[in-house]
């Protein structure tokens, strides 16, 4: 247990400090620029995440899956895994440079915002270098080194944002250039340190390895594209149906919630290599069950505690963005349900049934689009948040049930209870008035506390018996 907690702690330092720096960056930005300007900067972030989703071709996930099989030839594995994503990154960059005005019109409603598009084109190859460098460090379970690079990225973003606001202009341009500059420098640093021993030019493509990796990774692509609807349609539909100001409010709430992604990031970074190692070592299913139980109860309690503290969010964002706290509750379901699903869904990877990710993403993505189209015209940002939250409930259950089918029949009763509790509290904090939502959350936290303590004791005992102490 102590060994696992030490590794978890090392991986947690980077996301924790990074989240703290991000927590400082968001109110700094909302202080200097308007909601409409913040909405425009969020379109750049959306374009960045959308392109990064497509250009990897699932090879990053294939690298993770093959790492333990190719542990003695990591350099060869990494060189082959990076080949296609780097080609795709350069292709996307060329396309952005060729269609700059059209991209500017699509993102910012005007054709003359060329510099932000150039910044996006320039940063894409460096994003690939950064991602694969971090993946290598992560799979080698070097938590402290990983954390240092995560902190570097967030610190550079914060510093560049402050410098540009003070010396350049107080607009969305400064936010975009700070983001791009931080990504480029971090990519260069990781290349010169973690990737310097990879002999890219001396390793010929391994057709058998590439074929095996593509067979694992390509089925993730349709799932990723469909999953794009789950993560991006809320912002795109708000962009089409409402103003940049409403999009700015929603994006501010989303950014604050993304700080909660510290827990999601820490757990995922730690859990994926450990889960695959346990599977290869044929650890007992009781180890996985203990982790699943503690993660589900911990995330449920965390959700309730954050809802109890939502007024702090309004204070941090400032008066112009204060209405974001009524958008805030349902967006919390994104990191909460995603983290819970990560604990349960490893059975899909164990069985190499990645094609089922297409079904999972299609189901939750279609529900997301339908709910957005129904709720945004009525509730604007609140409607988009509800659509996102409910879609992630569906996402969690789809991953859980499919993993259970191909792995083992772990119990579901606790997940039904936790899902119901989370939904009840999100509805209360979005629509109920006065002290009612706070009373509901407080009662639920007190009721779940004994179960959380029992889960912690069971997890500790089980892992000690399994030799993971």
Image: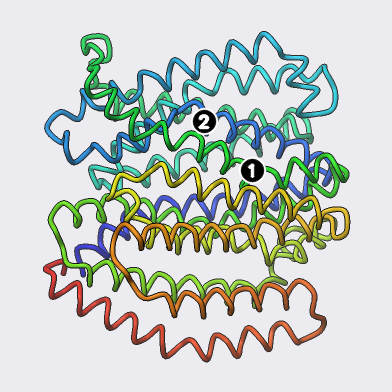
Real-space CA distance between mark 1 and mark 2, rounded to the nearest whole angstrom: 25 Å
- For the point 66% across and 56% down, the residue is 388
Q: Position of residue 294 (x, y in %)?
A: 37, 74
Q: Residue at x 39, y 19 (%)?
A: 84
Give the label on residue 289, or none: none
SS assignment at label 1: helix
Eye-nearest disc, 1 or 2? 1
Q: Position of residue 466 (x, y in %)?
A: 13, 70
The answer, for residue 389, to whether it is visible in the render is yes
Looking at the image, residue 129 lies above or below residue 357 = above
Q: Position of residue 375 (x, y in %)?
A: 81, 58
Q: Quadrant of the C terminus?
A: bottom left
Residue drawn at (77%, 14%) of the image: 101
**Residue 229's mark?**
1
The answer to whether residue 267 of the structure is visible from this angle is no
N-term-proximal mark, 1 vs 2:
2
Residue closest to the eye, 451 or 286: 286
Q: Is residue 110 left or right of residue 354?
A: right
Residue position marked by numbered label 2 in the rendering: 183
């Amino acid at each position: 247990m102590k060994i696992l907690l030490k590794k978890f702690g090392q991986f947690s330092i980077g996301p924790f400090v990074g989240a703290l720096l991000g927590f400082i960056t968001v109110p700094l930005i909302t202080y200097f620029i308007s909601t409409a300007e913040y909405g425009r900067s969020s379109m750049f972030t959306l374009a960045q995440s959308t392109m990064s989703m497509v250009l990897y071709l699932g090879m990053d996930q294939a690298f993770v899956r093959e790492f333990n099989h190719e542990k003695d030839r990591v350099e060869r594995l990494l060189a082959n895994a990076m080949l296609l994503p780097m080609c795709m990154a350069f292709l996307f960059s060329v396309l952005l440079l060729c269609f700059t005005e059209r991209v500017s019109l699509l993102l910012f409603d005007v054709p003359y915002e060329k510099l932000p598009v150039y910044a996006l084109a320039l940063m894409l190859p460096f994003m690939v270098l950064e991602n694969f460098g971090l993946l290598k460090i992560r799979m080698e379970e070097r938590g402290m080194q990983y954390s240092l690079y995560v902190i570097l990225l967030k610190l550079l973003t914060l510093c560049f944002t402050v410098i540009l606001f003070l010396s350049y202009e107080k607009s969305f341009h400064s936010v975009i250039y700070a983001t791009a500059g931080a990504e480029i420098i971090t990519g260069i640093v990781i290349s010169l340190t973690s990737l310097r021993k990879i002999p890219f030019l001396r390793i010929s493509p391994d057709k058998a390895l590439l074929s095996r990796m593509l067979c694992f990774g390509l089925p993730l692509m349709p799932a990723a594209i469909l999953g794009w609807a789950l993560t991006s349609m809320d912002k795109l539909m708000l962009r089409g149906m409402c103003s940049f100001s409403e999009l700015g409010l929603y994006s501010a709430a989303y950014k604050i919630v993304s700080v909660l992604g510290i827990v999601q990031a820490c757990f995922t970074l730690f859990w994926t290599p450990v889960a695959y190692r346990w599977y290869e070592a044929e650890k007992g299913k009781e180890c996985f069950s203990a982790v699943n139980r503690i993660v589900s109860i911990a995330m449920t309690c965390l959700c309730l505690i954050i809802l109890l503290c939502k007024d702090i969010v309004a204070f941090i964002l400032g008066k112009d963005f204060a209405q974001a706290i009524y958008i805030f509750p349902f967006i919390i379901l994104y990191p909460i349900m995603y983290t819970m699903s990560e604990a349960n869904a490893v059975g899909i990877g164990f069985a190499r049934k990645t094609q089922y990710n297409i079904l999972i993403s299609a189901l939750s993505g279609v529900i997301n689009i339908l709910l957005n189209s129904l709720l945004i015209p009525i509730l604007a940002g609140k409607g988009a948040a509800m659509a996102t939250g409910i879609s992630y409930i569906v996402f969690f259950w789809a991953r859980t049930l499919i993993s259970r089918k191909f792995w083992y029949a772990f119990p579901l009763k606790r997940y039904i209870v936790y899902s119901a509790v989370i939904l009840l509290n999100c509805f209360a904090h979005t629509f109920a008035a006065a002290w009612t939502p706070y009373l509901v959350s407080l009662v639920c936290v007190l009721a779940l506390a004994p179960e959380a303590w029992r889960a912690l004791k069971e997890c500790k005992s089980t892992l000690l018996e399994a030799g993971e102490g």
